[in-house]
Image (spheres, rainbow, N blue to C red):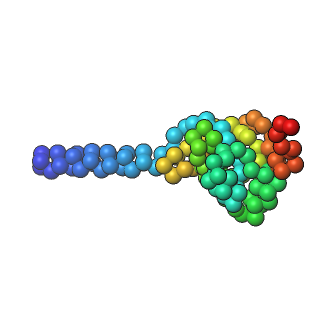
Amino acid sequence: MHNSRRALLRFTHVTLVAFGFSLSAHAQDKAVVRGWISDARCAPGHVSAGKYTGTNPDCSKECIAKGIKMLLIDPDHKSLLTVLNPAAAKNYVGDFVEISGGTNLEKKTVRIESVKLLEKGRAMCDVPDKSTK
């Protein structure tokens, strides 16, 4: 009886440790991330061209309204993060923001807890080139 009790305790310990590792593999780290709120249609092309800046806010708003995934262009880490709760950032599409929340860099996701506007986005197609004459 003493051996079966020890075996049960050992089994319980191993199960709890394995369960803990499973949870930690899917856990999100709390972080503050700065970047541009965009969409999955415009942002990937922008980023693949080496541009970690904002996309056209009007285009991104239109795409997100049509159900295209919301992304965060993160210039500091040169990555794209999928926004898991887009309703939290719906008023900031096209803007440069600071997001507090949970990030999973392995899955490239962010869950927003709070958003702070840092710079209002604007379409760059109407901005004159700054070339010297």
Left/right of residue 133 with respect to residue 66 in the rendered view: right
**Which residue is located at x 57 percent, y 36 percent?**
31
Observer-nearest of 126 and 66: 126
Residue at the outermost bottom position: 66
Tally the numbered discs: 0
Question: Residue 107: horizontal and vertical position, in percent?
Answer: 51, 52
Question: Residue 72: horizontal and vertical position, in percent?
Answer: 65, 48
Left/right of residue 11 with respect to residue 96 in the rendered view: left
- Residue 35 vertical position relative to residue 86 in the rendered view, above or below: above
Observer-nearest of 117 and 11: 117
Splitting the image into 4 quarters, where does residue 62 fall? bottom right
Splitting the image into 4 quarters, where does residue 61 fall? bottom right
Q: In which quarter of the image is the C terminus?
A: top right
**Which residue is located at x 27 percent, y 45 percent?**
13
**Which residue is located at x 48 percent, y 49 percent?**
106
Question: Residue 132: horizontal and vertical position, in percent?
Answer: 83, 36
Whether residue 116 is visible here, answered yes or no, is yes
Left/right of residue 117 with respect to residue 5 in the rendered view: right
Observer-nearest of 118 and 3: 118
Whether residue 113 is visible here, answered yes or no, is no
**Which residue is located at x 76 percent, y 64 percent?**
66
